[in-house]
Image (cartoon, helix red, strand yellow):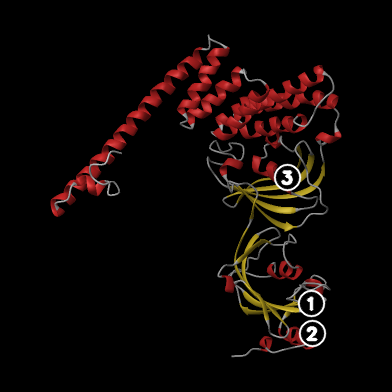
């Protein structure tokens, strides 16, 4: 069956036909994007700015010629809506759709490929037609472990974001299982939200927000109130929470390149102290933020003269050693090794770095490497009893590992022998020929 959209049209007749049957979804109502719904979606929820959306689409010229089709490639297309990653018409249209909705949209040049068009596919200044289906959408994940998901209700202004150390003014509404437990206007320092009873997830979302942004944050327990919960807010252990956040204003902290060495050394003490406080309180992720700030200040700093270079190195070694200890508690052993390596590159006999790297390697079942680290600790400090005890543990683990290997291979060869013997009973062939068919008899290997 041939539809109106399949017939060749000029821009004027296409606009008239779509305007009669569809809806102008452009903010300015200039008929730049007109949508005709072919199949309604499910429910009333629509994507928000920044959501990860999945669509199928077919793009056509007004002549009816198809120039692109996701179904021909047998895979849908994904993008973050409202981020300028796709045609302007797509961003506008998808924000108006529901999951499962199928529609056809007419896009004027300013909302599609513009005056240049697309070489070999789209003529200059061409209106185009898209058939679109919204397969799925979900919030934007702000962390690799999917612990913080953001959905933006109102996009912010400008291109700058708060950084660690910035002062921010926000409005917060926190909910758990639909119950409002926190509603307030509050100011805090990014990286230190814990001090104001604000969970880590809200703090970590700040550097993704713009002034005036209104978003909803979905926080997993790790980024909310953890296994302890919150007595103040009457939240049990391991509960997900949702925060609605408006970033009203902020003042960025100075970046590394905006400070001289003297200023960095002055604030180093306070930031290290704050990190140590968080560590002692068991807030290891918050402590990591403080120590990483120190690394960012000094890692590219050269200094002039031996005295300045020594101070820079001392600050970096302190930060990396403390980071290694935090990551040990967080069981992120690769990060432990990385930070210890950076210390050892500068100070190959650093007892703490060697010991902590050994601990991480032992916990990663790298027993030989761990033993070598602890042995190196004893060369630096022969009276280190903890390292001596760890060497004994490594040797026990190495022995257990070898015994396990012997049992594994013994069982493997036993099964091979039993299989070959069974086949020999049936065929009369020698077992050695079945197990090693590539080697002729009576030839030394």
Q: Which residue is mark 2?
A: 11
Q: CA distance from mark 1 to mark 3?
A: 37 Å
The vertical placement of 355 against 12, above or below, is: above
Q: Which residue is mark 3?
A: 206
Q: State the image coordinates of residue 93 (x, y, percent, origin top left).
A: 71, 71
Who comes first in sequence, dot 1 or dot 3? 1
Say whether marks 3 and 2 touch (CB < 8 Å). Answer: no
Work out whether residue 274 or residue 325 is closer to the camera in this orientation and state it.
Answer: 325
Say whether marks 1 and 2 touch (CB < 8 Å). Answer: yes
Q: State the image coordinates of residue 78 (x, y, percent, origin top left).
A: 63, 63
SS state under label 2: helix
Question: Along the horizontal axis of the image, is 378 left or right of 156?
Answer: left
Q: Quadrant of the N terminus?
A: bottom right
Work out whether residue 63 or residue 426 is closer to the camera in this orientation and state it.
Answer: 426
Who comes first in sequence, dot 3 or dot 2? 2
Question: Along the horizontal axis of the image, is 106 left or right of 386?
Answer: right
The vertical placement of 311 against 112, above or below, is: above
Q: State the image coordinates of residue 318 (x, y, percent, origin top left).
A: 68, 23
Who comes first in sequence, dot 1 or dot 2? 2
């Amino acid at each position: 069956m041939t539809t109106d959209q399949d017939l060749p049209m000029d821009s004027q007749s296409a606009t008239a036909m779509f305007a009669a049957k569809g809806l102008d979804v452009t903010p300015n109502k200039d008929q730049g994007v007109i949508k005709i719904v072919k199949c309604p979606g499910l429910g009333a929820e629509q994507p928000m700015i920044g959501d990860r959306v999945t669509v199928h689409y077919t793009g056509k010229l007004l002549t009816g010629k198809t120039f692109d089709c996701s179904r021909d490639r047998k895979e849908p297309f994904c993008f973050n809506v409202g981020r300028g990653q796709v045609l302007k018409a797509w961003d506008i249209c998808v924000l108006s759709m529901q999951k499962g909705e199928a529609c056809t949209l007419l896009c004027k040049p300013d909302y599609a490929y513009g005056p240049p068009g697309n070489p070999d596919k789209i003529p200059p200044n061409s209106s185009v037609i898209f058939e679109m289906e919204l397969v799925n959408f979900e919030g934007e994940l702000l962390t690799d472990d999917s612990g913080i998901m953001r959905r933006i209700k109102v996009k912010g202004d400008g291109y700058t974001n708060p950084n660690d150390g910035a002062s921010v003014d926000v409005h917060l509404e926190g909910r758990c299982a639909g119950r409002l437990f926190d509603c307030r206007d509050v100011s805090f320092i990014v990286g230190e939200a814990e001090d104001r009873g604000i969970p880590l997830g809200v703090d970590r979302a700040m550097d993704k927000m713009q002034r005036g942004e209104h978003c909803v944050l979905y926080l997993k327990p790790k980024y909310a109130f953890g296994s302890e919960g919150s007595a103040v807010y009457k939240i049990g252990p391991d509960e997900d929470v949702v925060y609605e956040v408006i970033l009203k204003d902020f003042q960025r902290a100075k970046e590394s390149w905006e400070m001289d060495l003297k200023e960095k050394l002055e604030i180093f003490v306070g930031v290290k102290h704050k990190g140590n406080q968080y560590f002692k309180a068991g807030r290891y992720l918050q402590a990591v933020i403080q120590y990483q700030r120190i690394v960012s200040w000094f890692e590219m700093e050269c200094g002039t003269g031996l005295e300045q270079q020594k101070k820079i190195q001392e600050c970096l070694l302190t930060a990396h050693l403390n980071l290694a200890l935090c990551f040990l508690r967080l069981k992120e052993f690769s990060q432990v090794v990385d930070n210890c390596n950076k210390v050892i590159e500068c100070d190959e006999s650093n007892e703490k770095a060697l010991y902590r790297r050994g601990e991480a390697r032992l916990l990663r079942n790298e027993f030989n490497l761990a033993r070598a680290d602890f042995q190196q600790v004893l060369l630096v400090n022969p009276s280190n009893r903890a390292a001596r005890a760890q060497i004994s543990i490594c040797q026990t683990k190495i022995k257990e590992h070898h015994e396990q290997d012997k049992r594994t291979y013994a069982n493997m060869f036993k099964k091979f022998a039993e299989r070959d013997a069974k086949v020999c009973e049936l065929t009369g062939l020698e077992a050695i020929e079945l197990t090693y068919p590539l080697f002729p008899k009576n030839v030394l290997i």
